Image (spheres, grey):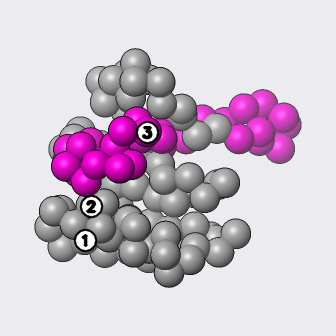
Amino acid sequence: MAVSDEQIAFVRDLFSSLPALTTRKMFGGLGIYSEGTIFAIIGPEERLLIKAKGKLAEDLAAEGCEQWSYAGKSGTPSRMPYWTLPDSALDDPEEASAWARRSLRETA
């Protein structure tokens, strides 16, 4: 998987209200940062995933969002601290940025 220019433009538009927004290609995906702190990625299956733990992860789960997991070498699922965003946030920069601000506050 290689992140496209269109995907980068989408992320920049979606989170444009965040300060000092930057992106960095890595491991075939994309790291998404605000003021140098990573808060989201484009990861496996080209999905946009936001960093979450604790109450934020619980709230995302309640919205029907999925946590990123993969089968480790032993076949046991490994869960990563990244979650999909609610579908409604993918079309709403204000909502997406609200989730991102929570991620920055609650996972830093």
Q: Amino acid at mark 1?
A: Leu
Image coords of residue 77 (percent x, y): 72, 32
User: Can you tell which quarter of the image residue 59 is in?
Assistant: top left
Identity of the amino acid at label 2?
Phe
Q: Residue furthest top?
A: 62
From mark 3 to mark 2, how far is it between C-alphas?
Answer: 15 Å
Horizontal placement of 78 versus 105: left or right?
Answer: right
Q: Quadrant of residue 3?
A: bottom right
For the residue carrying disc 1, how many other residues have a C-alpha within 10 Å: few (<14), some (14-19), or many (20+)? some
Q: Amino acid at mark 3?
A: Asp
Residue identifier under label 2: 15
Q: Position of residue 36 (x, y in %)?
A: 26, 69
Of the residues tagged 3 and 1, which is closer to the observer?
Answer: 3
Q: Residue 99: x, y in percent? A: 26, 42
Tag shown at residue 78: none
Q: Residue at x 70, y 69 (%)?
A: 1
Secondary structure category for the residue under label 3:
helix
Q: Do the numbered discs 2 and 1 sit on residues whose CB atoms are within 8 Å?
A: yes
Q: Which mark is residue 87?
A: 3
Determine crowd level at label 3: few under 14, some 14-19, many 20+ residues with C-alpha closer than 10 A.
few
